[in-house]
Amino acid sequence: MDTDEGDTVLMTVRATRRPPSLQQAARSLGVRQSDMDRAFGVVPIDPDRGLFAVKVRSASVAVQGEAGGNRFSNPRIAPFGRK
């Protein structure tokens, strides 16, 4: 998935011992790997507690559920006001 393909959400996944692969994270969340942002990857939030973040296409999460993940908004950040 490219980062510009529609709205995305940030989701947390848990893993033990080491960061999960995108495939493992997708399976944990119940979404397709193709719905995950490969460029974003798997980002450590608190590796000592086994907590990592991934970016997922929001439509796939709404359809397929959140199977164990926590969902957080990921609003676009852009300039506003006068140029």
Image (cartoon, rainbow, N blue to C red):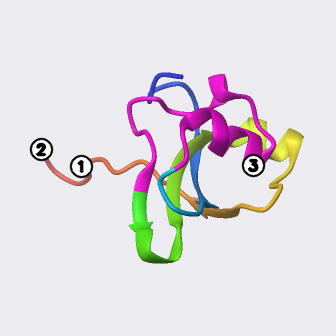
View extreme (left): residue: 83
**Quadrant placement of the C terminus:** top left
Residue 18 lies, in percent from the top left, at 48, 56
Task: Name the residue carrying label 1.
Answer: 79
**Range of residues picked out in magenta:** 20-43
Mark identifier at residue 20:
none
Query: Looking at the image, which residue is at 74% across and 29% down?
Result: 32
Q: Secondary structure at mark 3?
A: helix
Whole-angstrom CA distance, mark 1 to mark 3, is 32 Å
Tell me where residue 13 sits by quadrant. Answer: bottom right
Task: Name the residue carrying label 2.
Answer: 83
- Cβ–Cβ under 8 Å for marks 3 and 2: no
The amino acid type, in three-letter code, at marker 2 is Lys
Task: For label 3, count other residues whose C-alpha is less than 10 Å away and answer few (under 14), some (14-19) or many (20+).
Answer: many
Report the mark closest to the observer, 1 or 2. Answer: 1
Residue 68 lies, in percent from the top left, at 78, 62
Q: Earlier in the sequence, mark 3 or mark 2?
A: 3
| 75 or 69, nearer to the observer | 69
- Cβ–Cβ under 8 Å for marks 1 and 2: yes
Q: Earlier in the sequence, mark 1 or mark 3?
A: 3
The amino acid type, in three-letter code, at marker 3 is Leu
Query: Looking at the image, which residue is at 58% across and 63% down?
Result: 16
| 2 or 51, nearer to the observer | 51
Residue 30 lies, in percent from the top left, at 81, 43
| 39 or 23, nearer to the observer | 23
Query: Looking at the image, which residue is at 40% across and 53% down?
Result: 43
Task: Name the residue carrying label 3.
Answer: 29
